[in-house]
Amino acid sequence: MIGLIGRKLGMTQIPTKDGSMTAVTVIEAGPCYVLQGKTTERDGYNALKLGFGEIKARKLNKPILGELKKIFGERESYPALVIKEIRTEDAQNFKPGQELKVDIFQEGEKIDVTGISKGKGFQGVMKRWGFSGGPKSHGSKFHRKPGSIGQHTEPARVWKGKKMPGHAGMKRVTVKNLEIVKIYLEKNLVLVKGAIPGPNGGIVVLKKAKERSK
Amino acid sequence: MDKIKEIEKDFLRDDIPDFGPGDTVRVYIRIKEYKEDPKTKELVEKVRLQPFEGVVIRRRGDGLNASFTVRKVTQGVGIEKIFPLHSPVIEKIEVLRRGRVRRARIYYLRERKGKKARIREKR
């Protein structure tokens, strides 16, 4: 089970065979390059370190640059704008410098997409946790408040983890079992049915779906 | 954004005639039906063409998002259908008559019937 690092380009709609329109997200996925294979014997777990997106050599720090030089030799830019590890059991089948493209996926396949959701700032309990709030009118003075947050003299405190107002969004979100509608291999583009987390231009990770949807 | 436009371009149709509000058109819609084959007793997919004839009362959107509304009156009941312009369900669009109208959206047709709902022909 391998994956790719990509960039969310935006959303559009395309017609399906039966004539209705489907909302799709366009993701520029890969090409990613294997930077390192991690194995249980040496690192304690199996994973692939992947690099995505070109970055100029002078913008990189020396430890990373040293690693990249070992793989790609002396270059002006390296595919290391984003470096991420993806857990996979067959890490030993890949060697550093190998290119991964969208052809690891197939049209019609289900994938999981992970990204950082759009930040919403400090939000109340209705937006952040979906509380229902109170009536808007009919003399009500209770509109968007959370209501009671605890019990009585016992326990005389608020439970840890109580859903309260605070910062919403800007956290890691995975959307599971998204269908791949179309793949453009030469353009490195994947069209996925539905929405994915994050703003346009945000970095996302695509993996084969872990669980089968029923 | 440009890459998204490129993708949309793949789905755009170039066989759509030039028409606008006020024009009378006939739209042929492909309708899929499942009929039982008398010999094999299997469900066979059959494609049937259904024409829908009426006056275009608006066009909206651009690119893949574009759509148009066709209005006709059957047995005293007005029927409006909205078609995505680039829908693969549309087999073809025939322009029957060019109408001269002075607005982009001729919603006023909805309140009129009979002689008052006439549209002058474009010369």
Image: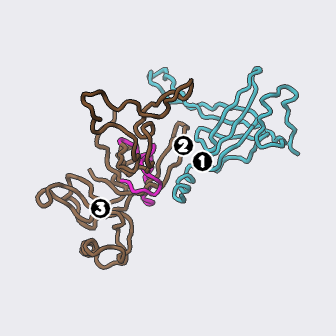
**Residue A193 appears anywhere in the view:** no
Q: Which residue is mark 1?
A: B64
Give how far apart the Cα atoms at labels 2 and 1 are.
9 Å
Say which quarter of the image contains residue A154. top left
Dot 2 falls on a residue whose secondary structure is strand
- State the quadrant of the C terminus of chain A: top left
Give how far apart the Cα atoms at labels 3 and 2 are.
34 Å
Mark nearest the camera among 3 and 2 is: 3
Q: Which mark is residue A50?
A: 3
Identify the residue shown where x is 45% and y is 34%: A145
Q: Amino acid at mark 1?
A: Leu
In the image, the chain rendered in cyan is B
Q: Which of the pair B15/A72 is nearer the observer?
A: A72
Dot 3 falls on a residue whose secondary structure is strand
Q: How is the image coloured?
A: by chain
CB-based contact (under 8 Å), mark 3 and mark 1: no
Q: Amino acid at mark 2?
A: Pro
